[in-house]
Amino acid sequence: MKKIFSILFILLFIIIGCDNSSGPDSSITSGETTINTLEENNKFSGFSFAQGGKIELPNEKNIDPDILLLVLRNEDGDVRGVCFCSSNDKKTGFLLLEQKNDSASALNYYNNLIEIPDTNYSNYATLVIVDKYQILAVKTADDKYGKILILNADVYTYPDNPLRCYGEARFKWMYQPNGSRIFK
């Protein structure tokens, strides 16, 4: 009996150990996420629709994010704000759909946004300055669609070094993994 259990255990271990999948495995299609530009232990964060949220970079599975966050400065070095951008390997596009003045009207617009407009991909920018209460349409590099409501987007200075800063954005998101522009 002990021998049978040992063999079954070894077979189970081999079967589980043979899973080489490195692609997206998340079934999460909506949520709320915060990403920032802080670097901790030589890693920083990005956002992946297919993974269902924030991911660390670099990562073991070499998954590229759909969205990276940057602090944008003008030519004089003054901070202009934070922006979403496409990662090097991806060509994620962003389209500003609406900017509201308060959270209630922004949430109402976001919740009632059932369909992303049918527009040419060239209308989507690969870099967009984000501000709270903006609603964005997102087209991923693999032709999937998402929508985002920016809840907060700020630049903060480090207490020990006011010349250094980092950006942070908190947002609601919804993703359509089948490529449809319609959200239900």
Image (cartoon, helix red, strand yellow):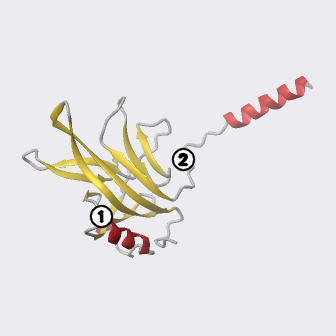
Distance between the alpha carbons at the discs numbered 2 and 1: 32 Å
Look at mark 1 in the image and give the residue it sits on. 133
- Depth order, front residue of 119/1: 1
Q: Going 29% across and 69% down the picture, which residue do you hit?
A: 123
For disc 1, the neighbor class at 10 Å (few under 14, some 14 to 19, many from 20) is many
| SS at mark 1 in the image | loop
Instruction: Give the number of callouts.
Output: 2
Q: Going 47% across and 62% down the picture, which residue do you hit?
A: 175
Q: Is residue 150 visible?
A: yes
Q: Position of residue 1 (x, y in %)?
A: 93, 26
Q: Position of residue 73 (x, y in %)?
A: 15, 48
Look at mark 2 in the image and give the residue it sits on. 23
Foreground: disc 2 or disc 1 = 1
Q: Going 37% across and 34% down the picture, which residue do you hit?
A: 43
For disc 2, the neighbor class at 10 Å (few under 14, some 14 to 19, many from 20) is few
- Depth order, front residue of 163/64: 163
Q: Which residue reaches farthest top?
A: 2
Tell me the quarter of the picture where residue 103 sits. Answer: bottom left
